[in-house]
Amino acid sequence: MPSILLPLLLLLFVTACATSPEGRTQLVPPQPLQGFSAVYSEFDMHLQLVTATNAPACSEVECAADRAFDQRILALGRRLANVAYRQHPDLHLRFPRFEFVIADKVDPGAASSAAGTVVIYRGVRQLNLDDAALAFILAREMSHIIAGHHDENVTTSVLIAVAAQILFPILNIGTLFSGSAATTAAATTATTAASTAVTTTAVTSVASFAGSRALRASDRPLQVREAESMAMKLLAAAGWDGREVSDQLEALRPALPGEPDWTVELRESTRHIASRMQGPLLPDTPVAADGPPQAAPKPLAPDLPPSRISAPF
């Protein structure tokens, strides 16, 4: 029993309840572990980059187009970052600035970390997107950071790992995998115990990794919907019209066979944004009793938060 108490105490220590900017309850690391969360998510982001296919070396014309694309991303990122720090003044407590990086990867995609790094894959340029659509891609990735989705994913991974350390020894999982070999081999009790311990550790590690990935994948759709909503608010505060963003996203090239999961996810976001832009049905034009029909009142512009924090790009 005492051997179980330490993991249970660790389980309680590594979790804390928080509320996302959209009002959703989420589990995140407590303040002392925020640095670990940033490091872990940075490692996870680099793992995605390592496994992605590198883009071939560019020709002179292609290199010029790449440089122009890089400048567009940096300009759009600067504009969005300034608004993000105004909308969320507490961001400067988590990281001093957003950093935008273009990775030379052949497929379109994007990644980010809790430390404020946003990576856009070189393949996004081949989608030939307008500034409004590119701004949405940046804003959606920034919203994952602002909403604490990376911290949430880190907590999920830690919880799964701790749970595996508690449950697997109790269930004697290692014996199930190594028991048959131990009974047929002429080994000593010490060797059998060591083999069982090694097997249990290996199985626990594999199961915790697979379990955390599966659980994070199940949370992904909800996180993406939340990031979409926050991204549209960020774009509106930065001066983009929602319908313009939706129209540019819908101009995305036709689907190709075997396209990356990221592009499929972007198409899903496009459909959700288009649905949001349609909005509820407007009431019929009111008619005054003693006059001509009156125009329906225009919706009021949302109140923007005051400019309290300004952070460098």
Image: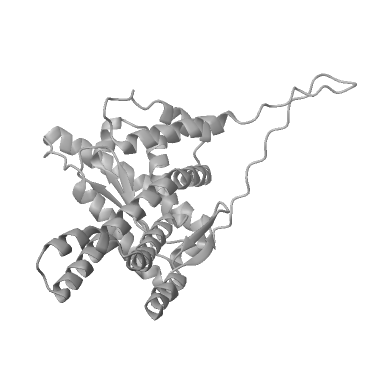
Residue 76 image offset from top left, x and y in percent: 38, 45
Horizontal and vertical percent for residue 44?
29, 56
Instruction: Describe residue 208's horizontal placement relative to residue 281 as left or right.
Output: left
Asked which colour scheme the image uses, the reply is one colour
Q: Is residue 78 visible?
A: no
In front of the other: 181 or 152: 181
Please tell me whether residue 43 is drawn above or below residue 236 in the rendered image: below
State the residue lying farthest toward the left: 186
The spot of residue 297 in percent (x, y) is: 73, 32
**Residue at horizontal 40 percent and vertical 80 percent from the top:** 2
Q: Residue at x 58, y 54 (%)?
A: 23
119 displayed left or right of 239: left
User: Could you say which quadrant of the image residue 45 lies in?
Assistant: bottom left
Q: Residue furthest bottom?
A: 2
Which of the pair 190/76 is nearer the observer? 190
Asked whether, in this view, residue 170 is left or right of residue 143, the answer is left
Residue drawn where x is 22% and y is 42% of the image? 67
